[in-house]
Amino acid sequence: MTNPILVALDTSDSDAALALAEKLAPVVGGFKIGSELFTSAGPDIVRSIREMDKDVFLDLKFHDIPNTVAHAVAAATRLDIQMLTVHTSGGHTMLEAAVTASKEEAAALGITPPLVLGVTILTSLGSDDMQKIGMDANVSRQVHRLSRLAADSGIHGLVCSPLEVAKLRQEMPEYFTLVTPGIRRSEDTRSDQKRTLSAPDAIEAGADRLVIGRPICAAPDPRKAAEEILRSITA
Ligand code: C5P
């Protein structure tokens, strides 16, 4: 079985990120590199993690005109990453362009294309915010609409809250990869995460990969924390 744990390297310090990644590499499936680390450390941090033979989830949430997103996805594909994100609200043409670019660039390089994953509605947005930006104030209806759009545009999966996984698993095509943050053990502090599940519960609900940050990175012994979480889902 693929190790489903993707550790979120949420820091701007590339040395600290690499040191942590080296410590965790034997017990996790890969690492999520988001806009903070990528903007600070650039593509070199991606290459260093790939040299450890670990998966990279490049979470830059592309959202632009289709041509620009296609070129950004092609550039990301050249880094030999395994997953990347785009905003589904970028629309059908943008989503299709992202998928096509990943496939064409990977074929030209003779590598496996990354999974293009959709982000629907950021969990930081509530119905008030939705109304102010002129979207359906019913968040779950809007999530559903964008998820369908993603599937119809050839996207390979979604990033979603652990509490949405079971429903999406039923509604979305079988091949869809569902990646979920918001993972907490009962002993973890929830911090700013409100809608959480434990790792085994998220897997049980149908999640394929788990993005875990502070429960591992902020633990006194990050490797031990990762090992415990891995044991909880493989036992
Ligand atoms: O530290 P924690 O486990 O909460 O980190 C979760 C990671 O997943 C962070 O990188 C965060 O930005 C990301 N994320 C999230 N909620 C979302 C989407 C992404 O927590 N809805």
Image: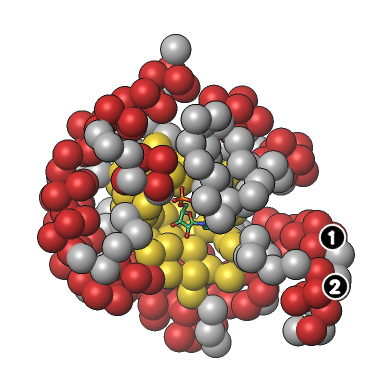
Residue drawn where x is 15% and y is 43% of the image: 22
| Residue 191, position as x, y percentages in the image | 52, 51
Q: How many marks?
A: 2
Query: For this view, does 129 lie left or right of residue 97?
Result: right
Query: For this view, does 87 lie left or right of residue 221?
Result: right
Colouring convention used in this rendered image of the protein: secondary structure
Q: Residue 126: in sight, yes or no?
A: yes
Binning the other alpha carbons within 10 Å of mark 2 as few (below 14), some (14 to 19) or many (20 upward) gives some
Ligand 1 is within 8 Å of the C-beta of the residue at disc 2: no
Q: Earlier in the sequence, mark 2 or mark 1?
A: 2
Residue drawn where x is 64% and y is 65% of the image: 124
Q: Residue 176: in sight, yes or no?
A: no
Query: For this view, does 169 lie left or right of residue 35?
Result: right
Q: Amino acid at mark 1?
A: Arg
- Give the labeled residue for mark 2: 136
**In-front residue for pair 125/175:** 125
| Residue 98, position as x, y percentages in the image | 50, 70
38 in relation to 178, above or below: below
Residue drawn where x is 45% and y is 85% of the image: 68
Q: Quadrant of the N terminus?
A: top left
| Residue 185, position as x, y percentages in the image | 51, 31
**In-front residue for pair 57/9:** 9
Binning the other alpha carbons within 10 Å of mark 1 as few (below 14), some (14 to 19) or many (20 upward) gives few
- Give the labeled residue for mark 1: 141
Q: Which mark is residue 5?
A: none
Q: Quadrant of the C terminus?
A: top left
Marks 2 and 1 sit apart, C-alpha to C-alpha, by: 8 Å
Q: Amino acid at mark 2?
A: Asp
Residue drawn where x is 55% and y is 87% of the image: 65
Dot 2: what SS? Answer: loop
